[in-house]
Image: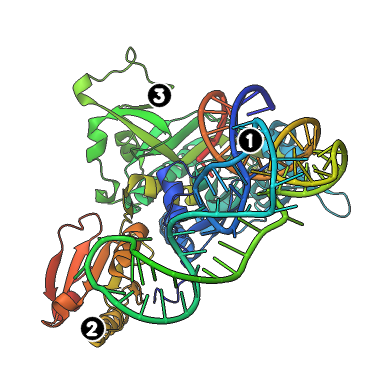
RNA sequence: CGGGGUGUAGCGCAGCCUGGUAGCGCAUCUGCUUUGGGAGCAGAGGGUCGGCAGUUCGAAUCUGUCCACCCCGACCA
């Protein structure tokens, strides 16, 4: 992509409304614009990152055998009355009515919709288990939206719902999600820590929330220093096998949020206690028959008896993750994207646009990298060098190739890794084209 | 939902106390100079001062009311 063509409205100054780094940087880097409180338009740069995260989450979900669906954003109030949540959910649920005065709502979550589909179609234990997921928009009318996309009212979420015939099978479904979540976050360049959690409005008796560590996170987190060494991607997981040992491995180390932690109940000596900050980016629940019971989602078991199906639901805040990743990866100059989600892998800075040597070299590098299917953003604007450096640092592409008159005469360019700008290396155009990024 | 705050050009702000017809920096456009970390000079365009009502000869400024947004707390992916 040529920067001269890209819709990228960056801001030099900090917008006053943005208080935390991710919000500030997303606005400044031209990723989002606010539409109203807690509701955003995603501009090309932000949209690309969102899609990248979505793809990783989708890949990991598919690996577990979960199947993708799309449910409506607008739901009938009727099914919520059946489950008993229509009144319970409170003002966070946006209630609307259509021209016939029928009661509708903009879905804050989808247990009711999926349970409704399930009960109308699945009748036998032989069909189970199923795990169905979707990745799309939800709306919760938060009293106080804040922190940009980290706490919006409209948000992009992966939610999935498991259906099993009995408790042990349901536990396996839960464990699959548990492990898949660890993998998702790790692939996004984050350090995930699962923590025992309250089940809140969704209900149930088994639940974990996933916290990622970030210095500017919203809540304090206390955990065993050994968490920092854990790497979910090093595990070779077969989702067909019993995953209990892995889950145990990943829940035995101490971890607690500040409202559950106190120096008196903490089992760790100070030397092993890591105190940091974290952001909640996922939550998984096993809630048994809470909805299947109230909504009559029953299947016939091996003995010919109709029994309510065992369920769980599992959420990942995809749009929130964009903010969380930035919170965990930025410096004073801007964002530092992890390779897995960066909107472009390489930025080419043409220091002197209009200089035939610089232009030619940039064009060559741009075209050849594109031919190698590397996502590259070429700053071909007739701007001053300082503007281009500042912009490239702000949008945080992991690699920067600088082409300037100092080096073009010798056929050389400079390469540096975002975050290590002082460690620029000078190399030939051939080696910059042949190396792997 | 309780408490606090802010709405003036695309962004950041001053002006308001003490009413007299709107200003600064950045951005944008034009020209010249400059050219390796958000350039300099000269010029230009852009605002029904959040909306409505009132007081007044006259309202960005005073009064009332509504709206929007932000911050702190309680709640959440």
Q: Quadrant of the N terminus of chain A?
A: bottom left
In the picture of the structure, the residue carrying the numbered disc 1 is: A143
Q: Quadrant of the C terminus of chain A?
A: bottom left
- Image coordinates of residue A294 in percent, x first then y, are 70, 35
Q: Residue at x 34, y 45 (%)?
A: A328
Marker disc for residue A258: 3
Give the spatial CA distance, label 1 vs label 2: 53 Å
Tags 3 and 2 in contact by the CB under 8 Å rule? no
Observer able to see residue A306: no
In the picture of the structure, the residue carrying the numbered disc 2 is: A361
Q: Name the image quarter holding residue A219.
A: top left
Pinpoint the chain carrying mark 2.
Answer: A
| Disc number lying in front (1 or 3) | 1
Pinpoint the chain carrying mark 3.
Answer: A
Pinpoint the chain carrying mark 1.
Answer: A
Give the spatial CA distance, label 1 vs label 3: 23 Å
Give the spatial CA distance, label 3 vs label 2: 54 Å
């Amino acid at each position: 992509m040529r920067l001269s063509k890209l819709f990228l409205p960056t801001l030099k100054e900090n917008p006053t409304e943005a208080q935390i780094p991710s919000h500030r940087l997303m606005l400044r880097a031209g990723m989002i614009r606010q539409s109203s409180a807690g509701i955003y338009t995603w501009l090309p740069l932000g949209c690309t990152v969102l899609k990248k995260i979505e793809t990783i989450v989708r890949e990991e979900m598919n690996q577990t055998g979960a199947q993708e669906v799309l449910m409506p954003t607008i739901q009938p109030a009727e099914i919520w009355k059946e489950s008993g949540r229509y009144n319970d959910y409170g003002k966070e649920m946006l209630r609307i009515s259509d021209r016939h005065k029928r009661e509708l709502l903009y879905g804050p979550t989808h247990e009711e919709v999926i349970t409704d589909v399930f009960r109308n179609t699945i009748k036998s234990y032989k069909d189970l288990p199923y795990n169905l997921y979707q990745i799309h928009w939800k709306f919760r009318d938060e009293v106080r939206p804040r922190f940009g996309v980290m706490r919006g009212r409209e948000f992009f979420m992966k939610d999935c719902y498991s259906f099993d015939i009995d408790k042990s099978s349901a536990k396996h479904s839960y464990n699959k999600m548990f492990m898949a979540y660890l993998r998702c976050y790790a692939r996004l360049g984050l350090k995930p820590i699962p923590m025992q959690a309250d089940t809140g409005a969704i209900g149930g008796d088994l639940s974990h929330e996933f916290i990622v560590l970030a210095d500017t996170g919203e809540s304090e987190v206390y955990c065993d220093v050994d968490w920092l060494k854990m790497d979910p991607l090093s595990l070779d997981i077969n989702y067909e096998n019993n995953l209990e040992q892995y889950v145990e491995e990943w829940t035995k180390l101490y971890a607690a949020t500040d409202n559950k932690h106190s120096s008196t109940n903490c089992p760790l000596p100070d030397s092993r206690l890591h105190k940091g900050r974290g952001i909640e980016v996922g939550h998984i629940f096993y809630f048994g028959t809470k909805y299947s019971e109230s909504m009559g989602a029953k299947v016939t078991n091996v003995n010919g008896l109709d029994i309510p199906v065992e369920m769980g639901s599992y959420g990942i805040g995809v749009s929130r993750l964009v903010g969380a990743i930035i919170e965990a990866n930025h410096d004073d100059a801007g964002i530092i994207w992890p390779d897995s989600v960066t909107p472009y892998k390489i930025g080419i800075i043409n220091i002197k646009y209009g200089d035939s040597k610089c232009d030619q070299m940039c064009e060559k590098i741009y075209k050849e990298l594109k031919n190698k299917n590397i996502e590259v953003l070429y700053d071909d604007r007739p701007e001053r060098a300082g503007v281009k450096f500042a912009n490239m640092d702000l949008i945080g592409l992991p690699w920067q190739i600088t082409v300037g008159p100092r080096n073009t005469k010798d056929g050389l360019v400079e390469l540096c890794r975002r975050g290590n700008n002082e460690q620029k290396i000078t190399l030939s155009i051939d080696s910059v084209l042949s190396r792997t990024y």
